[in-house]
Amino acid sequence: MTEDKDPLLLDHEVDGIRELDNKLPRWWVWLFYLSILFGVIYLSVYHVFAKGDYATKGQMQAEYQAEMKVGEALKVAAMTRFESGIPALKPLNDPQVLEQGKKTFLTLCAPCHRADAGGLVGPNLTDNYWIHGSNFTDNVTTIWNGVPAKGMITWKNTLKPNEVVDVACYIYTLRGTHPPNPKPPENLAPVKTGPSEFE
Amino acid sequence: MRAGNRGGPGVETFKYDNAIVRAFAIATVIWGLVGMAAGLLAATQMFWPALNMKLQFITFGRLRPLHTNAVIFAFVGNGMFMGVYYSLQRLCKARMFNDLLSWVNFWGWQAIIVSAAITLPLGLTTSKEYAELEWPIDIAIAVVWVIFTVNMFGTILRRRERHMYVAIWFYIATALTVAVLHIVNSMEVPASLFKSYSMYAGVQDALVQWWYGHNAVAFFLTTPYLGLMYYFLPKAASRPVFSYRLSIIHFWGLIFIYIWVGPHHLLYTALPDWAQSLGMVFSVMLVAPSWGGMLNGLLTLRGAWDKVRQDPMLKFMVAAVTAYGMATLEGPTMAIKSVWLFPRLYNTKLWSIKLANYHFWIALLGMVFYVVPIYVAGVTEGMMWKQFNKDGFLQYPNFLEVVQSIIPMYVLRAVGGILYLSGVVLMAFNLYKTAKSGQFQPDQEAQAAPLTREGASDEHSHGHRWLEAKPMTFTVLALVAVLIGGMVEIIPLWLVKQNVPTIASVKPYSSLELLGRDIYIREGCLGCHSQMVRPFRSETERYGEYSKAGEFVYDHPFTWGSKRTGPDLHRVGGKYPDAWHYNHMDDPRSTSPGSIMPRYPWLLTQTLDTACLPSRIKALRSVGVPYPAGYENGPAQKELEAQAAKVVGNRRRLPRRRNERLIVCEASNRLTKQEKRTGQIP
C-alpha cells in the first residue's frame, strides 16, 4: 500500500504526521444520531410531556411509590400471619433450628448480650429475671418488636420471622446456664443505657 | 530566543527543550511507583484492615485519597506534562515560550504533590473526591496551572506552523476546562490554615463536585491523552491519521457533551430528577464521540498490524486505545509514551524489547485481575442488596453477609495490583538502563521558516481549517462549548427554590456534632460509607426513610460519599446505643463479627481540640449556616460539654468488657460516634 498515492491523503503535514480524510463510518454516524434521538425522546417522555405521578411527583418518587405498594403488601401479609401465630409458638429442640439460632445469636445478639448471654450492654438472658416477660412467646415478641426506648433493637426490620424463632429457641436453651460474672438483674443495674436524647 | 539563520533564506534554527521533558518523565515513573504502591496497600487493607500497622496516617480512609491523588495528579499529571511539553514544541516548530515558566511548572507541580503526600495522611482534607487538598494547596494548583497555560499559549502564538494540529486542540480544551473546574469546585471559606468549608451546601455541593469529578476524568485524564494519542500513535506506527473530519467531529462532540454528564454519579440521589435525566441522556450521547477517538486511533493502525506484533509500544497503544473505548484506562498510554520517548531523549534504542514485552503482558494480566473481580464484586453486591424473598423481606438484611461474600474478590484485585506494580517496576528498570546506555540531548536543534503575514493571506483556507490558524478564536469557541453544559445544570439549582424543598425540622449541627462531622471528614469515613438512602424499597427497608434534598442544606461540604464498602450511615443515628459505638470504634469486630472496617482506637484516647470551634462556626456562618449571633463565644462550648457528658454517661454505665480498664478522662475526649443531626421527615 503506497500512502503517497492515497487520494484521501490531505496535503498538509506537521512534524512528519499526515492525515487522511476518510468518510465517517456509517454505523458510527447512525449511533450518534440514535443516541441523540434517544435523549430527545427520553426527556420528552419523562419531563416535557410527563403525565400523572410522573408529572406531579417526579420519576423517582412515582417509581418508588409503585414499588412500595407491591412490596409492602407482600411483607405486611407475611408479618401479620406471623404475629397472629406468635401466641401458639412453642420452643423447638430441632438441632438445625438451634444451630441457625446460635449463628444469629453470635452475630447479632452477642455484641450486647455477650456470647454466653451473661449480659453486657443488654441484660443477662440466662437468669430468672425477665424485664419484658418470661414466656417463650414474650421473648419472641421482644426480639421482633424490640424495645427502642431501652436500646433493644427492633429486629423485624432485619430478621425474618423464622430467624427470630430460631434465635428465640436458642436463647431458651441458655436459661439457667449460669455463665461466669453475669450482669446483675436490671433493677440493680444503672437506669439508662439507651440512646442519648441527641440521637 | 534569538533564532539563527543558517538553513537558507527565511529558515530559522532553534532548539527544542528536552531537559524539561526528561524531568517530567522521571517524575512520572517515580510517582507512578509511589502511587501504585499506595494503591496496593489500600487494596490489601480492604481484606486485611490490620495492615494499617496501627498508624492513623495510613489507615484506609486517609490512604485512599493519597493513592487516587498520587495516581491521577502525580503520575498521570506528570505524564501529561511530559507528553505536552514534548509534542507541543514539535507541533508548533518552536521551543517552549519561556524556560523559566517551564521549570516553575515542573517544580511547582512536584511541590504540590509533596504537600499532598504530607497533608492527606495527616487528615487535612476537604473530603471532596479528587479535590481533597486543602485551600492553600488549591491556590497553588491554580497558580501552577495558569503558568502552564500561559506557557502553552505563548508557545502556540510563537509557532512556525500555521495550523494547529488536532493534538493541540485537545491541549487547549484541557488547559481551559481544568482551570474552570478546579476554581469553581474549590470555592471554599477557610476556618484555619488547613481547614475550610465548601461554599456550596448539600445538593449543590454534590452537583458541583461531580461536575468537577467527572470532568477531571474527562479533561485531566482523557482529553490530554487523546491529544497525545493523535501525536504519538501516527508517529509510532508511521501511518497517517485515519480521518481528519472524524477528528473534528469527535473533538467538538466530546468537549461539548462531556461536561453535561457529571450527574450520572448522582442517579437516584436527592438531586432533582431533571438534572439526573440530563446527566443520563448526555452520557448516552457521549458514547459515539468517545468511540470516535478510539476508532480514529485503531483505524490509523490499519495495515500496520504486523508492526503491532513486534513492537511492544504499539501493543500498549492498542491496549490503551481499546481500553479507552471500553472504560478509559490511561495507564498503558503512559507506558507507551515513556517507552517511546526515552530512547529518543537519550538518542539510543530501548535497552530491552523483551523486557518491555514482559511488562506489557504482566500489565495486561494485572489489569484483568483487578478489573474483572471488581466488576464481579460490584454486580454481586448490587444483586444481594436488592434481593427480596417471596414474603417481601430482604434476602440478605445483614450487610456483613454481603461484605463477606465479596472478600475473595478484594483479594484477587490486590493480586492484580501486585502484577501491575511489578510491570511498572520492570519498565522503570528498562528505562533506567536505556538512559544509561544513551546520551541525553538537553537541547535538540531544529529548523523551520517563521510565519509571515503574506503566508496567511495567500492560503485560502475555509471552515475548520481556517479556525485552526486562529488560536484565540478557537480558544473562545472551545470555552463556550465547555461552559454551556455546566451552566445549564448548576445555575438553575441555585436560583430555583423548589429544587431543594426546605424541611423545617432540619437544624445546623450542634457544636459537638460539628466537630464530630469534621472527624468523619478527617478520617475519610466517606471513603467507605455513603449518607444517601436512595428511593428504592431495597434501600428504605435496610436503612430507613430515603434521603431528601432539604436535609442537607447545612452540609458544607456534602458527605454523601460515593461507594458502600460499609453500610449507608444517613439513618444510623439512634439505631445503636452510644456504648455500642464506643466498642465498635475501638474494635469493629467486637460488635460486628467479620467486619473489614479498620480499628479507630485513637478516637477513644486523643483529646478533642475545641479551641478551633469559634473559627469553624464563623466560617460556616459566612457560607450561610444560621448559627445564632454569639453562639461561638460560650454557648457552643457549653452545649458541647453537656452533650459530651451525656454520651459519656451512657458509656460509663456500660459494664467492663474483657479486661478493659474504664478510662476516666475529659468528657470531650470521647467522640466515639459520628454525630448525626436529627431530621424528622414530614
Image (cartoon, coloured by chain):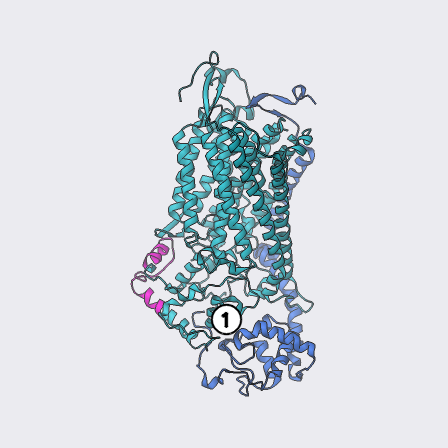
Chain colours: A blue, B cyan
Percent across and percent down for residue A155 are 58, 73
In this picture, residue B529 sits left or right of residue A31: left
Residue B461 within the segment the image draws in magenta:
no
Q: Residue at x 43, y 44 (%)?
A: B113
In this picture, residue B303 sits left or right of residue B652: right
Q: Is residue A118 visible?
A: yes
Percent across and percent down for residue A165 are 64, 78
Pointer 1 residue: B576
Relative depth, front residue between B312 and A20:
B312
Percent across and percent down for residue B299 are 66, 32
Residue B626 within the segment the image draws in magenta:
yes
Percent across and percent down for residue A145 are 57, 76
Query: Count the marks: how many?
Result: 1
Q: Residue at x 40, y 68 (%)?
A: B670
In this picture, residue B618 sits left or right of residue B391: left
Chain letter of disc 1?
Answer: B
Above/below status of B1 relative to B224? above
Q: Residues within 10 Å of mark 1 (few under 14, many from 20)?
A: some
In this picture, residue B602 sits left or right of residue B232: left
Amino acid identity at mark 1: Tyr
Quadrant containing the N terminus of chain B is: top left
The secondary element bearing badge 1 is classed as loop
Residue placed furthest toward the bottom = A128
Relative depth, front residue between B646 and B634:
B646
Above/below status of B302 relative to B612? above
Q: Which residues are magenta?
A: B614-641
Residue B234 lies in what quarter of the image?
Answer: top right
